[in-house]
Image: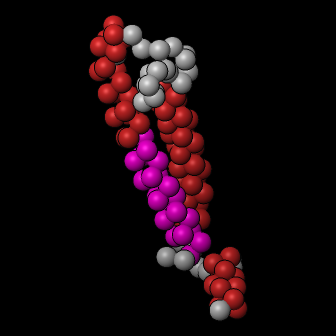
Amino acid sequence: MNQNFINIVNLMASEDTARAEWIVKSFPIIKIVLACLICACAIFLIIASLCQKSDAEGGTNAITGQADTFYNRNKGESLQGKIKKWTIAISITILVLCVAFLVINSIYNGTI
């Protein structure tokens, strides 16, 4: 079974596969753009996660460490809802971009 796996890896890594010229020219640029988008979304996801209100008993924020008062809780409820929605949207975007990167990379290597 190990020999079969090594043969498959060698097939994927070989440069003998015939690829169209537009694939050779455009796919590296597309891969770089997708990687940059994934990095940017990851940074936004980290920031959005840090800005969310803690579910702990104190209700402190991860960045400021301040506890929520009644005024702050009622004032920022819509903002917290928006931050949660953005967190979910960015997470789904990262998932889609990673799958697209995998598909692009597989096509470029000739495995699909």
Asked if residue 97 is among those painted magenta in the image, a careful observer would answer yes
Q: Please, which residue is most extreme toward the front here? A: 57
Q: Position of residue 12 (x, y in %)?
A: 63, 78
The quadrant the N terminus occupies is: bottom right
Asked whether 92 or 52 is in front, the reply is 52
Asked if residue 92 is among those painted magenta in the image, a careful observer would answer yes
Q: Position of residue 58 (x, y in %)?
A: 46, 21
Q: Please, which residue is most extreme toward the top here? A: 71
- Type of secondary structure dominating the magenta stretch: helix
Q: Is residue 101 above or below residue 45?
A: below
Q: Residue at x 43, y 44 (%)?
A: 91
Q: Is residue 82 above or below residue 76?
A: below
Q: Is residue 31 above or below residue 91?
A: below
Report the side of 74 relative to 102 (left or right).
left
| Image: magenta residue range | 90-110
Q: Position of residue 40 (x, y in %)?
A: 54, 38
Can residue 112 be seen at all in this image of the molecule? yes
Report the side of 95 relative to 4 (left or right).
left
Coloring basis for residues: secondary structure
Q: How many marks?
A: 0
Q: Residue at x 54, y 69 (%)?
A: 106
Q: Residue at x 45, y 52 (%)?
A: 95
Can residue 52 be seen at all in this image of the molecule? no
Q: Position of residue 97 (x, y in %)?
A: 47, 52
Asked whether 1 or 64 is in front, the reply is 64
Report the side of 74 relative to 40 (left or right).
left
Q: Residue at x 55, y 16 (%)?
A: 64
